[in-house]
Every structure is written in C-alpha cells, then in structure tokens.
Image (cartoon, grey):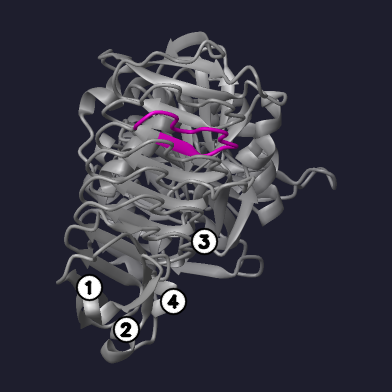
Amino acid sequence: MTLTLTLRTPPPALVVAAGLIPEQLRGLDVSEIGAVEVRCNGEVLAVGDLFDVAGTADEQLVLAGDLRRFDWIGAGMSSGQIDVRGDVGAWAGAEMSGGLLRIFGDAGDRLGAAYPGARAGMTGGEIVVSGNAGAEAGVGMRRGLVAVSGGTGAGAGLRMLAGTVIALGGIGAEAGLGNKRGSLVSGRPAEPLPSYAFATRFHPPALRLQLLRVRELGLTVDDALLRGAWARWSGDRTELARGEILIFDEDVRR
Amino acid sequence: MSGYVVGDTEVADTFAEAFPMRFARLLITAATETWALEAARSMTGFATSVIGCKCEAAIECLLTSSETPDGRPGAAVLLFAMDREGVGKRVLERVGQSVMTCPTTACFDGLAGAERTVPLGRSLRYFGDGFQASKVIAGQRFWRIPVMEGEFLVCESVGVGHGVGGGNLVIGAGDEDVALAAAQAAAEAMRGEGVALPFPGGIVRSGSKVGALTSNSMPASTNHQMAPTLRAQVADTLVPEGVSAMFEIVIDAVSEDAVREAMRRGLHAAAGAGATHLTAANFGGKLGQFHFPLSELRDPP
C-alpha cells in the first residue's frame, strides 16, 4: 500500500522533513501520521497542518506538491520507496543507506550528501531526479547511485569514497574533487579538474548496466548513451586516483 | 509393458537412467551475437562428460538483446557437475579462460534467486591485480576487471541449482545416414529452455558402459552391446536386427520434467525422420535415482 502526503499549505519557512521516511511511518494510521511533528523555523508543526494524508503507511510514500521548502526529504532512509511529485529542497536523500528515492522535479543542494563533518555520506540506495540537482550532489558518497536527468551544480562527488553519480545533462564545475574510488558520469561535455588525467575512450560495460537501471527507474536515457563511447578520466590524483569521470564522447555504434 | 511403435519406428520397452547433478546457468553477452557465440562455444568446449571433462556443458539458447541484462545479444549456457564445489571450480576456470578472454563479452548469473551460490567475480577479480573495481547495481555486485580492450564485467557469484544429468535416447536405423539424420532431428527438437545436450552437435556415437570387461581401472568403456560391428560377436548384443548405426543423445536438464519432455520431443522427431528403432541406456536401474521409461513418452509433445 502507498501513503500519500499532498501539500495543502506552503510552510512559512524551511521545514526539516527528515522523519518522513517509510521506515518511521510504517504501521501508523492516518491520524497518527497527521500528528507526526516536523520542525519549521524553530517551531514544531504537525504533518496534518501541512499535508492531506491518504492511504496506508507501508513501504511506499508519495509526497506531492511544491516541496522546495522541505529539506532532508528521504534523509537517512534505509528501505522502502519515496516518490516526490514536485521539487524538493536541500539534503534530499542525505546519508541514505538503502531504498529508492525518486524525485519528479528538481532537487536542491547536497542531494545524497554526507552531513558536515561526516566521513561517509550515502552507503547504499538509489536516488533518481527527473530534473536538475543543485551543488555538491553525492558529497562523501561511499556506495549507491545518484542519477539526475538534467545537470548537477558545482562540486558534485566532492570527497567521494565510491559509488556513482550520473548527470545525464552534464556535471557542473569542480566535480570529483577529492574523489577516491567513485564514478562521476556526465552525459554532456565537461571539463574535469586538472587533477584528473585522460585515460582512454571506451564502452564501459558497467555504465551500460547502470544506465539501463536508471531507465528502469523512470529516467529517459537516450540509446546513444548506451551505444556510444565514453572518455575516462582518472582521478582525483590528490587522492588515490582510483576514481573516474566518464564523459560521453560520441555515438559509436556497437 | 511391451514396446510400441510410432509410425514405422519400434520403441523398446526400456528406460533411461539419470542422476542428480548440480548446475549453473550463465548469460554471456557481447557486442555481437557472433562474439557471444564464440565465447559460449569456447566455454562449453571439452565438456561432454563428467567422466573425462569434470563437467558437462552446452549452449542452452541464444538470447536477443531484449533478453539480456545489458541489452546486448547473448547466449545462455548450462554447466553441470556432480556437486556444488565442482560447479564452482569449473565455472571459474571456464569463465576465466573462455569468456573473459573473448572480445567484448560480459558474464551474468542466469539463475538469480538461487538458494546456493558459488563465487565467480569474487574470485576472478584477482586477475585485476588490484586494479579491479566493483559496482553494486540494482542490489547485485559486479566486478570490473581491466583488460586490454577495456573492461570485463562479471557478476559476483552465480546460483547453483539441482538438476538431472544423463537422460538419454538411442536412435537406430538400417542406414548410417538415416540414423544420423534422425538423431540430428531429435537433437534439434530436444534443445530448449533448461536443456543441455553436451556432446558434439548434441549427439554421441561412442556411448559407454560403466567399467570395462578387460580392466579394473577404467571408469568407462565402449557400449559393446550397442556396437553394430560386434552384433555377431557378443552374446548380449542389443543391436536390433537390420540396424547398422546407433546414436545416443544425452540430456542434462534443470529438472526431471525438462528431461522427460526433451526425450518426448526427441523420440517423436526421430521417429518422424526415419529412425527404425528407438531405445535408451540404463544400468539396470541400480545406479541412477531418476528413471525415464520410454513407455511414458508415447504421446507426442
């Protein structure tokens, strides 16, 4: 069953929505969910003050409306699925360890990122965004997938340990700074940092599988990206240099 | 129960005797069907009998790009051994030597969800000499092994299932060419989902018996009872009068039903292609857990 929260009243300020994840709502009835507290500008609001609540809380949660003032959506999630029908604020999916977060809109800054001072961010799970993402997506990621149909802002994959950030519309500036073993993928031309070195052009078989997975999760992936060649840049050479930035090169039929 | 006839073909009152085996199913993909097939043929080469090859393997079917995990053309391969450990060793050797070496290939588990697994990429990754990397995609771990062409992608482990090995059908005719044509028709009909025919073209002409009359050390020797040239020489010949050539088709499959239905398809195809006599090989019913009486195959598929 699916629990649907439809935004009724825009909040007066930013809302910390970290608790709105399936594992914390599972088993609650509609009135109990309406009474769940979220913090807004230092005050406590009830979910029912902001949302119309419908359905049963189980593994799937749908959030609908303009949620740009809602930060931390899906943060800390370890299982289940959240579908957001609208834009979201910052820190969506931060430090996820499992489950699926789909955002049918734009995501703010630090999508799937590590908390400030934390050594590792996402340790599992999948985040897909049908629009664009803000700055520093996937910061400190250790494992998992962040896939964005549009572009990512500056600093994607900062201090990545491993995992994959895909930006079909292209990664922004300074991507992969401090990257150890992570994979950054840009579907559009991009300029890697000077601490990355060009390795080769090839057809990465693992990326093909990941792109098919992203397509399965609802993003549009052009066949050319599946067939074409990708440039591999190795880095960050200020770290292990075992990470990579893959940049779509050309449509080479295979 | 006596034998019966299908058209002009006499079907003997006997049964095939088969054994429990363990198997793995691998999906090999490549840039083209040609390369997928090259890898699959290489991997299933010299895998006709556990007696001499330590495993039995065959191409189950070709796969279209819509049927494979990475959207490229591929081939499904079935590999059988006597136990899970044997499956693990043979899969590792053969994927390492025949699939990883073949241009453009990738290798996936075709038995997802199996209760028991054996390591594949988890072991093969060491060929990467420290440069290997892994990706978890949709909950499954894969290994990226750098090679001279780019990367070889291989799944972390493969599932192992309980299968049946040694189902068989013996096809005879008065003319060698007719017998072979009937065997070919049977092999063609028997191939299908869950079925492996491990011998060349699916057909074996040197059917064997357990042990030997002249040696205590040989595990197997020629099936003298079904050798037409010995028909007038041995007292216990099983070659029917008028038969000058016999071919055996050995079937390994993922289940008892898959063996039985493959035998049914083969029996009726052989009968329709000119076989005059059909029988099966067994060991008196004392060795194999599974018995497949030809009397149960009377109804066409």
Circles 1 and 3, Cβ within 8 Å, touching? The answer is no
- Tag 2 and tag 4, C-beta contact below 8 Å: no
| Residues tagged by mark 3 and mark 4 found on one chain of the structure | no
Residue B102 or B241: which is nearer the viewer?
Answer: B102
Q: Chain letter of disc 4? A: A
Whether residues under marks 1 and 2 lie with C-beta atoms below 8 angstroms apart, the answer is: yes
Mark 3 belongs to which subunit?
Answer: B
CA–CA distance in space, label 1 to label 3: 38 Å
Vertical position of residue A34 compared to residue B79: above or below:
below
Q: Mark 3 points at which residue?
A: B114
Pinpoint the chain carrying mark 1: A
Q: Quadrant of the C terminus of chain B?
A: bottom left
Dot 3 crowding, Cα within 10 Å, few <14, some 14–19, many 20+: some
Task: Give the overall secondary structure of the magenta segment.
Answer: loop
- Give the Cα distance between marks 1 and 2: 10 Å
Magenta stretch? Answer: A153-165
Foreground pick, B151 / A63: A63
Is the residue at mark 4 from the same chain as the one at mark 1? Answer: yes
Q: What residue type is labelled 3?
A: Ala
The residue drawn where x is 63% and y is 17% is A237
Which amino acid, by three-letter code, is at mark 4?
Gln
The residue where tag 2 is placed is A33
Q: Is residue B178 above or below residue B262?
A: above
Whether labels 2 and 4 share one chain: yes
The picture places residue A168, in percent across and down from the top left corner, at 29, 30
